[in-house]
Image: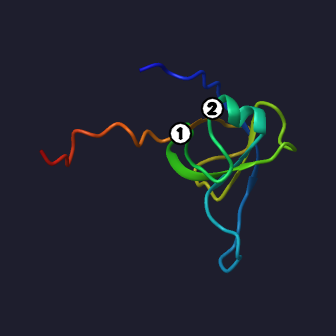
């Protein structure tokens, strides 16, 4: 299995929502060319891997985001200027746990 080229990205903005807002939840905004490099599309779920934890978030393509950066929403444990990686979940490879044979 080959590994994709996946350079790190810098968090350039953090958006937090309040309870009751209609558009809530973990989200990562990324430029279209950066998303294409990582083979992710608008609306897909990805792992956002930060220095302290990782969390699933929805991808939104936003070409207003600077090259090499991401804007995150409602992802705890991340702050502006931290370095993250965006990784597509591997749903094709089965795990050794819980496999019925």
| Front residue of 94 and 77 | 94
Badge 1 is on which residue?
A: 88
Badge 2 is on which residue?
A: 38
Is 100 left, or right, of 17 in this rendering? left
Q: Position of residue 49 (x, y in %)?
A: 54, 39
Q: On the rendered image, what quadrant is the N terminus found in?
A: top left
Q: Position of residue 31 (x, y in %)?
A: 78, 39
Q: Position of residue 5 (x, y in %)?
A: 60, 21
Is 92 left, or right, of 100 in this rendering? right
**Residue at image point 19% right, 46% down:** 99
Q: Secondary structure at mark 2?
A: loop
Measure how far apart labels 2 and 1 are at the Cα level: 8 Å
Number of marks: 2
Q: Do labels 2 and 1 touch, CB within 8 Å? A: yes
**Residue at image point 87% right, 44% down:** 64
**Residue at image point 30% right, 40% down:** 94
Within 10 Å of disc 1 (Cα), the crowding (few <14, some 14-19, many 20+) is some
Picture quadrant of residue 97: top left
State whether residue 86 is above or below residue 17: above
| Front residue of 78 and 94 | 94
Q: On the rendered image, what quadrant is the C terminus found in?
A: top left
**Residue at image point 63% right, 32% down:** 38
Q: Position of residue 48 (x, y in %)?
A: 57, 43
Which is nearer the N-term, disc 2 or disc 1? 2
């Amino acid at each position: 299995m080959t590994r994709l080229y996946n350079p790190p990205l810098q968090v350039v903005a953090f958006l937090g929502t309040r309870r009751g807002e209609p558009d809530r939840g973990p989200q990562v905004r990324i430029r279209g060319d950066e998303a294409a490099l990582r083979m992710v599309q608008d609306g897909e779920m990805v792992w956002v891997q930060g220095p302290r934890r990782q969390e699933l978030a929805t991808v939104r393509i936003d070409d207003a985001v600077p090259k090499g950066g991401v804007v995150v929403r409602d992802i705890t444990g991340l702050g502006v200027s931290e370095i993250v990686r965006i990784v597509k979940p591997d749903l094709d490879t089965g795990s050794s746990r819980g496999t019925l044979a």
